[in-house]
Amino acid sequence: MRTLIRLEILRTLRNRRYLFFTVLYPALMYFFFVSAYGSKGMAGGLSAKSYFMVSMATFGAVGAVLTGSAQRISLERKSGWVRQLRLTALPGRAYAVAKICSCAATTLPAILVVFALGASKGVRLSAGQWLGLVAVIWLGSFVFAALGVALGYAAEPSAVQPIVMIVYMLMSAFGGTWFPVSGTLKTIAKVNPVYLYNQLAAFIRPGVPFDLGAAATLAGFLVLFVTAAGVLYRRDTKQA
């Protein structure tokens, strides 16, 4: 399984589309938002530079794992590669775990590039806060990697890409990625994994503790998506 994970990571990092849409695109969007908002304050007393540094890092991380895992699985189903793997000694659960782990590992470049830009723009955090941000955003990306695997098996290969993009954009739009959510929208957003994902970074605000409720709910989503991925994988096995 370790060999499969290593090969998956190398294949992803060699993909130019991955480098643009999950690393460069969030960085460009960060420059755009910082320029548009300037020195304006955001929700919770954060500066625009800090707020969008986090939201663009999560945006890139979700894009890296969600689109990467779903579309790659759909292509492998179409080409017959998944069927060939089932003929080997590799267990089905090992294949799914390898997909989730390899996709989550590729989120680090997207996170680190945006954080480096934030630091260059004047975001000042302690060493512990920087390390904590990297850790929670990276670990949170496993939730969306599992969702990507589930979506990769849920739809026909020809329909996976538009479905993933719709899910990705809707969750981002109503999850605080592009603008702070408030009022009724905030109540609805509490069941949105992307909103909860962004909330993991709330501890960088002065006097705000780590949101254990958001972390626990995201853990629940992880269990749900992993379970769904397993069920859909077994269904696809029976249909193959």
Image (spheres, rainbow, N blue to C red):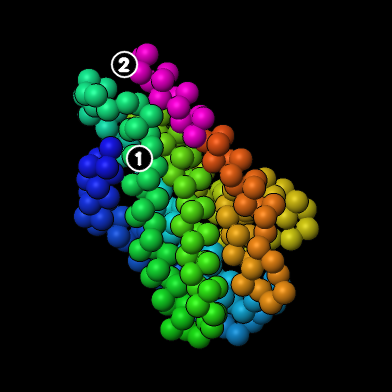
Residue 62: % across, % down: 46, 52
Q: Quadrant of the C terminus?
A: top left
At horizontal 66% and vertical 74% (from top left) the residue drawn is 205
On the image, numbered disc 2 is attached to which residue?
A: 240
Residue 195: percent from left, percent from top? 62, 54
Q: Which residues are magenta?
A: 226-239
From the viewer's perspective, is residue 131 above or below residue 153?
below
With 175 as the anchor, is 111 left or right in this view? left
Q: Position of residue 170 (x, y in %)?
A: 56, 48
Q: CA distance from mark 1 to mark 2?
A: 19 Å
- Say which element carries label 1: helix
Q: Is residue 4 above or below residue 139?
A: above
Nearer mark to the viewer, of 1 and 2 = 1
Tell me residue 223's x, y (percent): 55, 36
Few, some or many residues within 10 Å of mark 1 (<14, 14–19, 20+): many
Residue 99, labelled with which disc?
A: 1
Asked whether 229 falls inside the magenta stretch, the response is yes
Residue appearing at x 40%, y 68% in the figure:
112
